[in-house]
Image (cartoon, rainbow, N blue to C red):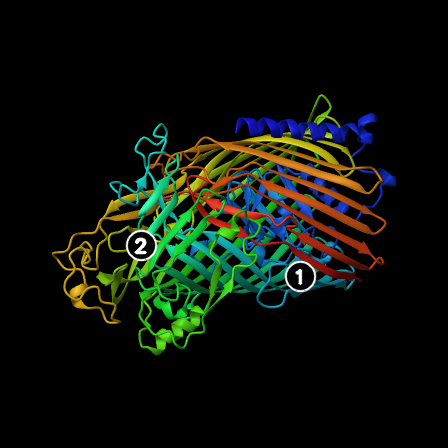
C-alpha cells in the first residue's frame, strides 16, 4: 500500500507540474477567474468543464460537479459513467453499465442520491441486489439531466443519509432559460457480444421547452426510449468452504500450507466449477414533465412529474459440476485447494430465466417566494414510488431456474484446477455409455422459483427560508424543517424442489464454447460445450406431471418517519485583505422506525432428498413487529479563504450519517442452506440497528490559474461509529410451537428420503431426532473505524488549440483491513480502493473528440462467512462528434474499447468466484436542436 501510494503521489505531482509548466499561465500573471467584457462564450466540453469548475469554486464546503454540455447533452450516456470522472468517485457496474457509485471508499449504501434535492425511492427485482436507499442511475436517461453535484462534506440544509457523499441530480426547468428550445436525438446501439436478438438496438430522445405570457409560464417535456441486447460470459464457483473435506484422507495433500500465517492448516474447498452465458434484453423508458409559473415577480410555482420504466429479461445457460467432496486434492501455501478431483459424480446442466420490471413515479410541487430583497421562503413536497415486479403476488417470479444432470455417480471423475486466473475443468465420462453429454444420459434434478416484489414509497415535505443582509459580517441566516415518511414493503417467494420427471418433451441441446471468455488466458481449458434449454419449459413439464408447488411467500417491511430542523449562518469577512467565507450550521433529526415480518409458522424439516431438508410451514401467517427510534445532531463548519484572486483554501468539519440497509432490519428468519450433513445456515434481521455516524474533516487547496483550468489537492479523514458488520451466532431455530428444529436425516426412518409432493410423515422431524445447530447470520452495530485519503485533480485547457486534459486520482485507506487468516473477523472496511481517471479531449471547428480511461484498484466487496474481493479494473471509453450545422450533429461513442474483464475472488486470488467478460459497445447517432 505504501509503495502504491508513493508512486501515485509522485506521478500525480509530476503530471501536474508538467501541465502547469507548459501552461501560458505559468509564464504570466494569474488570469482573472472571469473574462471580463472580452470573455469568450464557450460551449460543449469546455462549457461543461467551466460550469463544473465554477460550481466547485463558489460552493460552501467540498463540492464537485458535472454539467451538461448543452441542453439534453450530458458528457456520458450513463450518469454513473460521468460521475467516475470526479476524484474520489468510483462506480459499480451491472452488465457492464454503471449503476451505483462509491465515494471516498464508501459504497452505494453509504451515499445518498437525490433528484432536485428530493430523496428518491429505489427497488430491486432480485433479492441478491438488496434494497438500496440511493436512486439507481440506470433508471434515468442522462439527456434529462442538467447537472450532477457531489457534496463531499455535510451541510445542515441537505437531507441526511450520505455519509460518503450526497449526490444531487438536477433536471432542467423552463423558466431557467426562457424561450423555445427543442432537442431530438436518435442513436443506434451496437453491443459486440450480442448473440440473442438484434445486434443493433434503438435509442431515441426528445426534449421541448417553451415559455409564454411574457415568460411568466413555462412547460418542459422530456421523453426517451432505449433498448439494449447484450451477452455476458462468466466462469467461477458458487463459493469456497473452509475445512470441507476429510483431513484423514491420504489423497488430500496439505503439505504445502505455510503454517506461519495459517497455523491451523485451514484449507478451502470450492463448491463448483461453472461456465455460463447470459443473454439479456433490456428496455428503458423515461419521461419528465415540468410546468412553471411566475404570476408575480419573485414568486415561482413549479409542478413536475418524473417517471421511468425498466424491463429486462435474461436467459442464462450453465455447464457445471459440483464437488460433493475432495477425494483427491492439493492445497497451495495459503490453503486453497487449487487442484481437486471428485470420483463417481455427475455433470450439471443449468438454465435460468430472469425477469426484472421496475416502475418509478414521482409527483412533486415547489413554491419559491422572494418576500423581500432580503427574505425568501421555499416549500417543496413530493410523493414518489418505486415498485418492482408488481405481479409477484400473482405468481410471476423474477427467477425461474432448473438443473438437469447425469445419474448420480455415473461420471468416473470430475476435476478442477484453480491455479490460473480462471479454472480448468475436466471430467472422465468413459464409464457412461454414450458419454455425459448424451441427452439419453440426462435426467431431471430440481427447479426453483424466486420472486421479489418491492414497493418503496417516500413522502417528503421540506421548508426552507433565507434571510440575507448586505451589512456586516453576517450575510445570511438559513433555516428550515422537513418531514420524511419512508416506507418499504416487500414480498418474497422462494421455492426449491428436487423432482423426477421424464424429459422427452424438452427441447435440449449443446452449443460449442466458441469464443466464450476468450479474453482470459486458459479459456480453452474450460468446458467445451454449453447446454441450451428453457427453465420455464422444464417447469412446465413439472406442472404437467402434477409435481409443481410453491411455498407460501413472506412479507417484510420497514417504515421510517423522520422529523428534522436546521439553521446555518453565512459569514464573510477579510483577513489581511484576503476574503473569508464561513458557513456554520446545525441539523437535528429524530427518526422512528418500525419493521415487520409476516411468515407462515415453521412446522418441521422434511428429509425429502439426499441433498435436501425441506422447511415445512403451516398455513397460518403470523406477523412479527419491532420498533426503535434514535435522534442525532449534525453540525457543520465550512471555512474558505481566497489567498489570491485565483487561489482558494478550504477547511471543513461535519458530522454525517448513513442509515442501515433496509433488508438488514427485517425481523424475518430466512433459510439459506439446509442440507443433510450441513451446512445449516439462516439469516435474521436486526430492526434495532442505529445509523452509521461519521465525524469528518477536510482540507483542500484549489488554484484556478486560467479559464476552465485548475489544480486541486485535498485530504480528508472520517471517524465512523456504529459500524455495522456481520455477526454469526450458533444456536437452534424454533418452530411455531417454540420447539427447536430437529434433523430427520441423521437416523432416517424407512422410506426416507421421500420426494413425494405431499410430505411423508416418517420423513419429518420427530422428537427423537437430534437438534440442529444453525449458523445464524445477522448484523449488529460493532466498533468504530476510520478512513483517510487524498484527492488530486488537474483540469487544463491548452489555450485556443482545442486540446485539453483532465486527470484526477484518489488514495484512500482505513484502519480495519481484511485479515484472510482471521476466521473470526466480523468487521472490515469494504469498498476502499485507490483510483485514477485520465481524460483527453479536443474541441474546435465543430469537431469534438474525447478519450477517457478509468482505473480502480482491488477492493473488499463484502464480508460474510467468506469474504468477496474485486480485482483491479480499468476501462477505456471514447466519443467523437461533428457539428454539420449549428443545429445538426452526428456522433459516435465507444465503451470498454479494450475489452476489459472483471474478476471477483474469496480470501485469496486463487479462490475465484466470478470471472466475467462483456466486450465493447458502440453507438452511432444524430442530434438536432431547434
Image coords of residue 158 (percent x, y): 56, 44
Residue marked by disc 1: 189
Residue marked by disc 2: 673
Image coords of residue 831 (percent x, y): 50, 41
Label 2: state its secondary structure: strand
Label 1: state its secondary structure: strand
Q: Nearer the viewer, residue 792 or 877?
A: 877
Q: Nearer the viewer, residue 697 or 903?
A: 903
Task: Looking at the image, tell me whether mark 1 or mark 2 is earlier in sequence order.
Answer: 1
Q: Residue at x 79, y 45 (%)?
A: 842
Q: Quadrant of residue 514?
A: bottom right
Image coords of residue 860 (percent x, y): 47, 40
- Crowding at dot 2, Cα within 10 Å, few <14 / some 14-19 / many 20+, comes out as some
As drawn, the residue found furthest toward the right would be 38
Q: Quadrant of residue 646?
A: top right
As drawn, the residue found furthest toward the top would be 576
Note whether residue 896 is visible. yes
Q: Quadrant of residue 856?
A: top right
- Mark number, residue 275: none
Picture layout, residue 661 above or below residue 156? below
Cβ atoms under marks 1 and 2 closer than 8 Å: no
Picture layout, residue 615 above or below residue 720? below
Note whether residue 593 is visible. no
Quadrant of image for the C terminus: bottom right
- Crowding at dot 1, Cα within 10 Å, few <14 / some 14-19 / many 20+, comes out as many
C-alpha separation, residue under disc 1 versus residue under disc 2 = 42 Å
Q: Nearer the viewer, residue 268 or 167?
A: 268
Picture layout, residue 360 above or below residue 565? below
Q: Nearer the viewer, residue 320 or 629?
A: 320
The mark total stands at 2
Q: Residue at x 53, y 56 (%)?
A: 233
As drawn, the residue found furthest toward the left would be 768
Amino acid at each position: 500500500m505504501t509503495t502504491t501510494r508513493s508512486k501515485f503521489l509522485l506521478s500525480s505531482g509530476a503530471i501536474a507540474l508538467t501541465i502547469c509548466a507548459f501552461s501560458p499561465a505559468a509564464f504570466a500573471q494569474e488570469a482573472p477567474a472571469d473574462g471580463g467584457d472580452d470573455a469568450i462564450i464557450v460551449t460543449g466540453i469546455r462549457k461543461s468543464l467551466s460550469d463544473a469548475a465554477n460550481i466547485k469554486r463558489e460552493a460552501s464546503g467540498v463540492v464537485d460537479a458535472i454539467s451538461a454540455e448543452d441542453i439534453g447533452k450530458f458528457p456520458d450516456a450513463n450518469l454513473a459513467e460521468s460521475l467516475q470522472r470526479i476524484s474520489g468517485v468510483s462506480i459499480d457496474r451491472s452488465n457492464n453499465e454503471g449503476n451505483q457509485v462509491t465515494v471516498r471508499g464508501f459504497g452505494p449504501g453509504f451515499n445518498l442520491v437525490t433528484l432536485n434535492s428530493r430523496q428518491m425511492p429505489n427497488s430491486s427485482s432480485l433479492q441478491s441486489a438488496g434494497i438500496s436507499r440511493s436512486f439507481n442511475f440506470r433508471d434515468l436517461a442522462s439527456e434529462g439531466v442538467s447537472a450532477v453535484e457531489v457534496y463531499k462534506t455535510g451541510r445542515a440544509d441537505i437531507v441526511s443519509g450520505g455519509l460518503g457523499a450526497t449526490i444531487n441530480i438536477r433536471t432542467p426547468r423552463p423558466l431557467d432559460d426562457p424561450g423555445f428550445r427543442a432537442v431530438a436525438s436518435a442513436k443506434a446501439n451496437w453491443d459486440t457480444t450480442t448473440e440473442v436478438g438484434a445486434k443493433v438496438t434503438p435509442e431515441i430522445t426528445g426534449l421541448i421547452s417553451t415559455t409564454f405570457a411574457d415568460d411568466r409560464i413555462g412547460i418542459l417535456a422530456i421523453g426517451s426510449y432505449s433498448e439494449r441486447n447484450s451477452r455476458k460470459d462468466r466462469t467461477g464457483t458458487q463459493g469456497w468452504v473452509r475445512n470441507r473435506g476429510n483431513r484423514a484422507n491420504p489423497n488430500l495433500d496439505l503439505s504445502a500450507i505455510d503454517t506461519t500465517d495459517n497455523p491451523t492448516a485451514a484449507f478451502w474447498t470450492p463448491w463448483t466449477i461453472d461456465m455460463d452465458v447470459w443473454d439479456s434484453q433490456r428496455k428503458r423508458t423515461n419521461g419528465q414533465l415540468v410546468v412553471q409559473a411566475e404570476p408575480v415577480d419573485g414568486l415561482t410555482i413549479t409542478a413536475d412529474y418524473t417517471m421511468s420504466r425498466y424491463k429486462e429479461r435474461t436467459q442464462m445457460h450453465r455447464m457445471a459440476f459440483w464437488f460433493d467432496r475432495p477425494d483427491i486434492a492439493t492445497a497451495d501455501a495459503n490453503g486453497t485447494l487449487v487442484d481437486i478431483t471428485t470420483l463417481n459424480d455427475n455433470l450439471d446442466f443449468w438454465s435460468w430465466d430472469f425477469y426484472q420490471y421496475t416502475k418509478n413515479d414521482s409527483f412533486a410541487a415547489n413554491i419559491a417566494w422572494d418576500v423581500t430583497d432580503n427574505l425568501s421562503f421555499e416549500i417543496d413536497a413530493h410523493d414518489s414510488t418505486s415498485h418492482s415486479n408488481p405481479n409477484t403476488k400473482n405468481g410471476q417470479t423474477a427467477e425461474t431456474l432448473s438443473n438437469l444432470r447425469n445419474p448420480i455417480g455415473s461420471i468416473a471423475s470430475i476435476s478442477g484446477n484453480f491455479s490460473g486466473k480462471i479454472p480448468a475443468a475436466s471430467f472422465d465420462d468413459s464409464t457412461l455409455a454414450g458419454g455425459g453429454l448424451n441427452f439419453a444420459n440426462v435426467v431431471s434434478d430440481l427447479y426453483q422459483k424466486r420472486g421479489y416484489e418491492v414497493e418503496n414509497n417516500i413522502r417528503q415535505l421540506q421548508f426552507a427560508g433565507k434571510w440575507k443582509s448586505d451589512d456586516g459580517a453576517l450575510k445570511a441566516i438559513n433555516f428550515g424543517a422537513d418531514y420524511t415518511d419512508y416506507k418499504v414493503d416487500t414480498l418474497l417467494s422462494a421455492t426449491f424442489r428436487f423432482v423426477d420427471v421424464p424429459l422427452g418433451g424438452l427441447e435440449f441441446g449443446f452449443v460449442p464454447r466458441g469464443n466464450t471468455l476468450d479474453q482470459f488466458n486458459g479459456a480453452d481449458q474450460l468446458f467445451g460445450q454449453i447446454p441450451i434449454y428453457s427453465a420455464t419449459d422444464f417447469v412446465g413439464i413439472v406442472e404437467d406431471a402434477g409435481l409443481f408447488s410453491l411455498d407460501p411467500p413472506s412479507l417484510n417491511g420497514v417504515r421510517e418517519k423522520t422529523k428534522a430542523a436546521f439553521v446555518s449562518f453565512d459569514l464573510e469577512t477579510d483577513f489581511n485583505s484576503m476574503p473569508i467565507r464561513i458557513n456554520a450550521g446545525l441539523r437535528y433529526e429524530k427518526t422512528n422506525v418500525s419493521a415487520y415480518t409476516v411468515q407462515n409458522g415453521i412446522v418441521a424439516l422434511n428429509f425429502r432428498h439426499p441433498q435436501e431438508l425441506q422447511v415445512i410451514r403451516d398455513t397460518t401467517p403470523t406477523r412479527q413487529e419491532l420498533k426503535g427510534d434514535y435522534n442525532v445532531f449534525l453540525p457543520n463548519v465550512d471555512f474558505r479563504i481566497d489567498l489570491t484572486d485565483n487561489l482558494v483554501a478550504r477547511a471543513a468539519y461535519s458530522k454525517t450519517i448513513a442509515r442501515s440497509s433496509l433488508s438488514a432490519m427485517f425481523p424475518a428468519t430466512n433459510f439459506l442452506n439446509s442440507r443433510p450433513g450441513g451446512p445449516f445456515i439462516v439469516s435474521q434481521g436486526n430492526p434495532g440497528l442505529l445509523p452509521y455516524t461519521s465525524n469528518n474533516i477536510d482540507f483542500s487547496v484549489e488554484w484556478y490559474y486560467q479559464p476552465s483550468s485548475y489544480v486541486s489537492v485535498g485530504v480528508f479523514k472520517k471517524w465512523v461509529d456504529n459500524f455495522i458488520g456481520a455477526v454469526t451466532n450458533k444456536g437452534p431455530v424454533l418452530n411455531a410451537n417454540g420447539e427447536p428444529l430437529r434433523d430427520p436425516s441423521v437416523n432416517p426412518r424407512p422410506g426416507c428420503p421421500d420426494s413425494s409432493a405431499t410430505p411423508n410423515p416418517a420423513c419429518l422431524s420427530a422428537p427423537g431426532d437430534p437438534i440442529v445447530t444453525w449458523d445464524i447470520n445477522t448484523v449488529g452495530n460493532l466498533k468504530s473505524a476510520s478512513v483517510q485519503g487524498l484527492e488530486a485533480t488537474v483540469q487544463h485547457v491548452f489555450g485556443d488549440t482545442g486540446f485539453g486534459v483532465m486527470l484526477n486520482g484518489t488514495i484512500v485507506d482505513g484502519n480495519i483491513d481484511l485479515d484472510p487468516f482471521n476466521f473470526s473477523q466480523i468487521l472490515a472496511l469494504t469498498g476502499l480502493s485507490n483510483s485514477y481517471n485520465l481524460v483527453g479531449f479536443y474541441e474546435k471547428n465543430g469537431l469534438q473528440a474525447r478519450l477517457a480511461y478509468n482505473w480502480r484498484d482491488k477492493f473488499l466487496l463484502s464480508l460474510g462467512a467468506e469474504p468477496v474481493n474485486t480485482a483491479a479494473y480499468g476501462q477505456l471509453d471514447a466519443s467523437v462528434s461533428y457539428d454539420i450545422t449549428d443545429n445538426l450533429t452526428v456522433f459516435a461513442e465507444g465503451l470498454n474499447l479494450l475489452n476489459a474483464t472483471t474478476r471477483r475472488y474469496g480470501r485469496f486470488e486463487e479462490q475465484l468466484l466470478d470471472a466475467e467478460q462483456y466486450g465493447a459497445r458502440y453507438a452511432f447517432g444524430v442530434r438536432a436542436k431547434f
